[in-house]
């Protein structure tokens, strides 16, 4: 189905330009509503019994006294968080400037070209909803401190802003590349009678595109928290737990580990960064112990161990299914664009519909498809690695309990 759609991309009826803008506006509003209604858990330290009484509690009951989990310490937070606030301030200024430019652009179009149709009003006002939502989220995130709850809120806001900026940047790039015949092009028509109007429209397009790129880069490079160290050994922790959205998606946290392995003659546990607290054996064991009561609460017709596996790893299973479906769809995108590019080269000069602009679309689509598919595939394999370890730890726990 996806290949069929891509094959008929240049011959299909054009989708109105206001549709993707409206989708982004509705999506940003829904995301803001979700952030307002949902609250991250306070994440109080999970504790386990100090003696072995918890091994003999009745099924379906939870231990009362519990021991603390290990938590990593932040390295030099006093100098890190002022820099982070400056970074977030620059992001906020960029988003507010984008909102102001889009507002000026809507007023400019209405003044110069007259009152447009309702579809054009939707296309002009949709970016205002998008960047207005992003500005409010950024302003709320700006004064957050480095407490555990504030870090969780900051990270949720950062991921939301990055998702909005990434979607806006992808749509901007798409509308800059597509030919004018599709009706999606951002570029003003060259048929404008006044050259000054063409220059002003082009300047507005380039300004909004540059600011969108800046917002995408700023939100993508916002780290979650300060670099972490092991609470006992003070050994640096792998930056997976403190990196930015770009660092997570592009696997930048792996680079220091690979560099250390390449430059050292011998490798031991002291020469490599420590695992994050959530992935260390002590915390994994303690968390699995807290799931003892799940098997007693399993539905009647369910296998109790299977129920426990599904409940404990529900988020991981959902993440794997979503990535697998996305990767399966993206697998055919580069081949489809390559097929269209070869068809363009073969039919060049004979097919009037195959303009040079479509060649750029195919080339950029081929490159983007390969990059995105590689990143999704990498996240799929990386996300699959904790699942066998999780199931093994759960199996060991069940055998011991």
Image: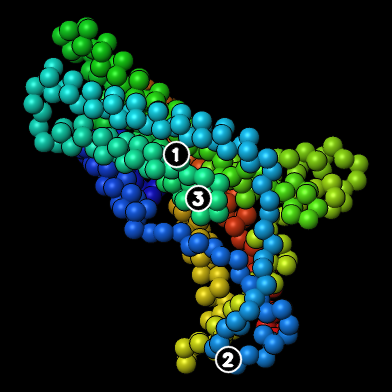
Which of these two is toward me, 199 or 329?
199
Q: CA distance from mark 1 to mark 3?
A: 11 Å
Q: Please give the name of the residue rendered at 47% of the width and 88% of the height, measured from the top-left corner.
A: 299
Circles 1 and 2: CB distance less than 8 Å?
no
Q: Please give the name of the residue rendered at 48% of the width and 44% of the height, measured from the top-left corner.
A: 144
State which tag comes first along the sequence, 3 or 2.
2
Circles 1 and 3: CB distance less than 8 Å?
no
For residue 142, the mark is 1
SS class, disc 2: loop
Disc 1 versus disc 2: nearer the observer: 1
SS class, disc 3: helix
State which tag comes first along the sequence, 1 or 2.
2
Which of these two is toward me, 83 or 350?
83
Q: Please give the name of the residue rendered at 75% of the width and 46% of the height, measured from the top-left corner.
A: 236
Indicate the position of residue 212 as horizontal and vertical percent values.
39, 29
Which of these two is toward me, 340 or 89?
89
Q: CA distance from mark 1 to mark 2?
A: 46 Å
Q: Mark 1 packing: few (<14 Cα in 10 Å), some, or many (20+)? A: some
State which tag comes first along the sequence, 1 or 3.
1
Q: Mark 2 packing: few (<14 Cα in 10 Å), some, or many (20+)? A: few
Residue under label 2: 59
SS class, disc 1: loop
Total of numbered circles in the picture? 3
Indicate the position of residue 220 as horizontal and vertical percent values.
50, 37
Indicate the position of residue 281 as horizontal and vertical percent values.
73, 66
Residue under label 3: 150
Q: Quadrant of residue 97?
A: top left
Q: Is residue 338 left or right of residue 229?
A: left
Q: Please give the name of the residue rendered at 15% of the width and 9% of the height, measured from the top-left corner.
A: 193
Please say if 221 is above or below 46: above
Q: Is residue 50 left or right of residue 34?
A: right
């Amino acid at each position: 189905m996806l290949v069929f759609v891509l094959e008929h991309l240049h011959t299909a009826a054009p989708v109105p330009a206001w549709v993707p803008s409206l989708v982004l506006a509705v999506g940003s509003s829904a995301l803001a509503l979700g952030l307002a209604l949902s609250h991250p858990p306070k994440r109080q330290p999970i504790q386990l019994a100090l003696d072995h009484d918890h091994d003999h509690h009745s099924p379906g009951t939870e231990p009362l006294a519990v021991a603390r989990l290990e938590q990593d310490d932040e390295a030099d937070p006093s100098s890190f968080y002022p820099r982070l606030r400056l970074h977030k301030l620059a992001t906020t200024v960029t988003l507010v400037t984008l909102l102001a430019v889009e507002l000026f652009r809507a007023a400019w179009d209405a003044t110069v070209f007259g009152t447009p149709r309702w579809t054009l009003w939707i296309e002009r006002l949709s970016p205002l909803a998008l960047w207005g939502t992003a500005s409010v989220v950024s302003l709320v995130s700006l004064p957050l401190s480095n407490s555990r709850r504030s870090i969780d809120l900051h990270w949720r806001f950062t991921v939301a802003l990055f998702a909005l900026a990434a979607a806006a940047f992808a749509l901007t790039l798409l509308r800059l590349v597509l030919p004018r015949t599709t009706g999606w092009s951002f570029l003003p028509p060259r048929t404008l009678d006044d050259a000054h109007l063409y220059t002003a429209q082009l300047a507005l397009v380039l300004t909004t595109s540059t600011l969108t790129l800046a917002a995408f880069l700023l939100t993508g490079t916002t780290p979650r928290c300060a670099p972490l160290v092991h609470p006992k050994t003070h050994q640096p922790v792998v930056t997976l737990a403190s990196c930015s959205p770009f660092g997570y998606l592009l696997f930048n946290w792996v680079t220091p580990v690979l560099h250390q392995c390449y430059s050292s003659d011998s490798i031991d546990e002291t020469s490599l960064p420590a695992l994050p607290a959530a992935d260390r054996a002590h915390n994994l064991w303690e968390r699995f112990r807290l799931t003892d009561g799940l098997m007693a609460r399993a539905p009647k017709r369910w296998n109790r161990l299977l129920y426990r596996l599904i409940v404990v790893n529900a988020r991981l299973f959902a993440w794997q299914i979503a990535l697998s479906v996305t990767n399966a769809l993206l697998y055919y995108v580069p081949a489809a664009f390559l097929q269209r590019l070869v068809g363009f080269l073969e039919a060049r000069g004979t097919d009037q519909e195959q303009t040079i602009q479509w060649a750029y679309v195919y080339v950029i689509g081929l490159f983007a498809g390969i990059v995105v598919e590689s990143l999704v595939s990498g996240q799929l394999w990386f996300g699959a690695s904790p699942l066998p370890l999780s199931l093994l730890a759960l199996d060991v726990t069940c055998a011991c309990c």
